[in-house]
Image (cartoon, coloured by chain):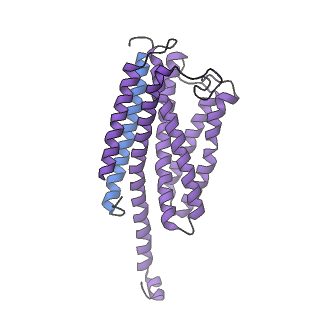
Amino acid sequence: MGDMGQRHLVLAYAATIGIHLVYLAYVAVKWLRAGKQGVGNSQ
Amino acid sequence: MKWWRWIWLLVTLGVLTEGFRVALFVVPSDSAQGNVQRIFYYHIPSWAGMGLFFAINLGCSLVYLAVRNRNQALAIRADSLAVASAEMGVVFCFIGLVTGSLWGRAVWGIWWTWDARLTSTLVLWLIYVAYLLLRRFAAGPQMRTLAAVMAIFGYLDVPLVYMSTRWWRTQHPAPVFGGAPGSGIDPSMMPAVWWNLAGWLMWGIFVASLRYVSEYRAQKAEQEEALKALDFAPGQTQMAGGR
C-alpha cells in the first residue's frame, strides 16, 4: 500500500474495531451487573 | 459464559482475522480508487449488520405487542431481544456512517453531503438512538409498548435508505449488489466480502446474545422485585391473606 487514502483506510478499519470494542466493554459491564442479580443464570 | 459461546467467539475471531488478512493483503486493489477502496470490506458488513439487527428489533417489537398481555415470559424475552438488537443495529449503523465518511473524504474530498442516502441513514440512526433514549429514561410496561410502536414506525426508514440510491440521484454511488446490469465487483474481490460479512455478522450475533442475556436477567429481576413488593404491601397482604 502507499497510495492516496491509505490513512483513511487505516482510520476506517481502526474505527470499526474500536467502536465494536467500546460497545463490547459496555455489554460486559451490563453482563457482570446482571450476573450479580442472580436471575436466569442458566443462560 | 457457557462453553458454546467461547467456541462461537473463537470461530468468529478466526473468521475476522482471515477477513482482515484477505481484505488487506490478498485481494487486488481497485484500478480506479487504489487501496482506499478496501474500506468497502468493512463498510458493507456494517450495513448488512444494521439491516439484520433492525429487522430482528422489528420482529421482536411485533411479538411483544402481540403477546404482552397474555404471555409475560415470552414478552420479556421478545422485549429483551428488541433492546439488544436495537443497540447492535445502532453500533453497526454508526460504523457505516463513520467508514462512509472516511471513504467519502478520500474519494470525493468531502466528509459529508446531504444527499438522500446519507441523510436517510443519519435519520435512521437518530430514530434508533431516540428509541434507546426512550427506553433509558422512561420506565414501566407503557414504556415498552411505546418503544415497540416506535420501533415499528422507525423501521419504515430502512427500505427508504435501501431504495434511496435507486429512487434519487445521489452523491453516494449506485448499488454495487443488485443494481443495474453490469453492477457488482470483480469476482477476485469477493472473498474479502464474504469473509468480512460472515465475521462481522457472527460478531454481532455474539455481542447481541450477551446483551440479550443481561437485559433478560435485569427485566426478570425487576419483575420479581415488583411481585415481592406486592406481596409485602401491608393492605394487600391483609386483604388477600398472604400468599
Q: Position of residue A38 (x, y in %)?
A: 32, 63
Give whichever of B2, B33 is nearer the camera. B2
- Picture coordinates of residue B28 (x, y %)? 44, 16
Outermost residue, right direction? Answer: B167
Side of B95 relative to B123 (left or right): left
Quadrant location of the C terminus of chain B?
Answer: bottom left
Looking at the image, residue B149 lies above or below residue B40: below
Find residue B119 and report its image quarter.
top right
Q: Is residue B154 left or right of residue A27?
A: right
- Count how many numbered circles sit on residues in the image: 0
The quarter of the picture where residue B232 lies is bottom left
Q: Which residue occupies the foreground of this view, B180 or B67?
A: B180
Say whether residue B174 is visible: yes
Chain A colour is blue
Give how far across and how far down residue B178 sits, in percent. Answer: 61, 29
B14 above or below B112? below
Q: Residue at x 51, y 36 (%)?
A: B48
The image shows residue B188, relative to residue B211, as above or below, that is above
Left or right, B178 with respect to B202, comes to: right
Q: Position of residue B99 (x, y in %)?
A: 48, 27
Residue B213, located in which quarter of the rendered image? bottom left
Q: Is residue B34 above or below residue B19?
A: above
Of residues B234 and B178, the one nearer the viewer is: B178
Q: According to the rendering, which colour does chain B have? A: purple
Residue under the image location 40 percent in, 18 percent down: A7
